[in-house]
Amino acid sequence: MSDAIRRMKDLPSTHLLGTGTAMCAGCGGLITLHEIYDVLGTKTVFVNAAGCMTLLAVYPFTPFRGSWLYTAMASAPAGAQGVRDALDILIKKGRLAPEEDLTAVALTGDGAAYGMGLSATSAAIDRNLDFLYLCYDNEGYGNTGQQYSPATPHAAQTATSRGSRGYPGYKKDLFTIWAAHRPAYVATVIGAEPLDLAKKIEKAKALKGPRLILALAPCPPGWEFDPQDSIEIGRLAVKTGVWPLKEYVDGKVVHTHVPHPRLPVEKYLEKQGRFRHLFEPTRNEALLKEIQTAVDQYWAEIEHG
Amino acid sequence: MLTAAAAAAATGVRVFTATSSQGLLYAMEMLYTVSGWRAPFVLVNVSRGLASPITLESDHNDLLAARDSGFLQIVCATGQEVLDSVLMAYRLGEDARVRLPVLVNLDGFTLSFTREPVELPTPEAVAQFLPAFDPENIRFRASKPVSQAVAVLGGGPYSYFRYEIHLAAEQALAVHAEVVQEFAQRFGRDYGVLECYRSDDAELVFFMIGAFATKAKDAVDRLREAGEKVGLVRPRLLRPYPAGAMRAALAGKRAIAVIDQNLSMGKGGVLHSELASVLYGDKRAPPIVASFIGGLGGRDISAEEFYEITATLKQAIASGETPPPRLLYTETELRQVRKLQAIAMVERNELGDKR
């Protein structure tokens, strides 16, 4: 018997995460979490860092059928370490039946994953911690009003980069930072591509060691778009090549989807209020070209080595 | 590190961890966070003065920065007491009436870099005193999913859970009395919430925590030989605060010298404030509760300084006026610092910066 996920119809039909949470309508992070949880299952303990999803579990409610531990902004991987070590000890000493074992999943936003929590993450990978790190990346500090984070893309306007050129920095490459540690697995996913996502979660689930699932999470209030467009914007992030779907395994990076032909990045940018200043009152051709060129160069290296 | 330790405790194993000084402050966010998880474990802190300036030897500002974190605090004066307190701390924190992490404090350098004989109990005797911990509901397992440390919205539920921590910490006083009694029966070493040394018939009392209190004991002996009615009261338990025991131990004394090896900038000694708050309004409270700061960054407190403190207390009794707080410092120390400053100035000038 093989229950490998190959086609859309292989995706789980039972949905495990409860509804009625405090997340915003159209939250790309929550869509991703739903899809991941369906594949990952309930034998999990989600070790959470401060972020939007901390409000998933508000006393006395939780949408999870498995377990949960809130830590703090910078230390979710350390929390996952404590849980993993304790479970290993309990099983080794015969105080916990092996079927009672759980997968430790660090669940954080980009503020923790790219910024404050990076030191704890790096240390956990060094120790070859057997855990899954799930980052929902909405490219800013969303639950405090979308201040920029190290994951904010170049030129995006945020609450703290309001000028006509938006955020002057460049999105930190967390995928490569993780891969440089030589962990068991690193993958980018997006909720708008559920089959690609499910295959990667299934692969990650079968591996041991540090594993990162980095999900781009379209954020209606932070990116300024209509909640109903969340999936469409996610698809455009992939089709324009802005969000490459890829994985690192066995020391190699493989792109699981190469968009061809790629749509112009404008198609993705023009749907979001955070990039409106690139089109109004006049088109900022120079900045649009800079963004397009960066994406073109990325794919040129992938396609032509 | 502290998150990992606490998460392991929350998963249902017995955990020990240790840190020191800056490390304790680095973990400060998690000290407050994990005490609310109500998953007991023991943390040893090796006290050391805090930056700036960065230094290596002991004082208690690190410990007192963690004062309100929800960790219970036991402050030790000798190596033997550290070992014994770690064992007792598990019993204290793991008790169903308490369920809080416990910080056991020892002084950096004074205790951590020196050696003294310590009697090690046999593993069998320890196992009898401290059997395996049954964490009951504190655990993660597949068949019984649980959410720990979840958020609350609004001050109502928040206050409820914070009050619960406070009340559990207060419960620890009664539990501590049971634990030290059993420890004394099994191992023959008797620890109270306070160590009272020649204080029963004393008129003047030194009040201080930590390893320097052993120097105070020596000073008490010498002062007694000189005819002074002096004693020492050394709190071992700082949280929960043993207010009743302190009032009783100091009742009817003529003057107290609180010697703080810490400094709350712009206020003074922390132990002094705390003691004054529980003595105020007590009919038998000593009329003079004077404040002295000493021992910062491992600065010695000499026998002569204990004599000087005694003389200051006697003057205060005679005049009926509490003396102003004193920062212990000698002329020799000041001369030495002036020398360092002179060297620094020469070096600066030789490097050509003649501003």
Image: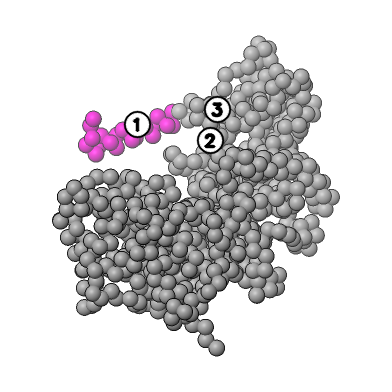
> Which residue is at 68% across, 24% downward?
B256
> Which residue is at 29% across, 57% downward?
A271
> Which residue is at 52% across, 57% downward?
A48
Label 3 is found on which chain of the structure? B
> Which SS does the magenta portion mostly show?
helix
Q: Nearer the viewer, residue A26 or B135?
A: A26
- The x and y percentages for residue A278 are 21, 53
Label 2 is found on which chain of the structure? B
- Which tag, 2 or 1, sits closer to the chain's start? 2
Label 1 is found on which chain of the structure? B
Q: Which label number is shown at residue B268?
A: 3
Q: Is residue B339 magenta?
A: yes
- C-alpha separation, residue under disc 1 versus residue under disc 3: 30 Å
- What residue is disc 1 on? B342
- The x and y percentages for residue A255 are 33, 76
Q: Secondary structure at mark 2?
A: helix
- C-alpha separation, residue under disc 3 versus residue under disc 2: 12 Å
Q: Nearer the viewer, mark 2 or mark 1?
A: 2
Q: Alpha-carbon neighbours of circle 1 within 10 Å: few (<14), some, or many (≥20)?
A: few
Give, as a three-letter code, the residue at label 3: Gly
Q: Quadrant of the N terminus of chain B?
A: bottom right
**Could one spot residue A232 in this view of the protein?**
yes
Q: Secondary structure at mark 3?
A: loop
> Which residue is at 64% across, 13% downward?
B321
Q: Which residues are magenta?
A: B335-355
- What residue is disc 2 on? B296
In the rendered image of this protein, does residue B130 appear above or below residue B21? below
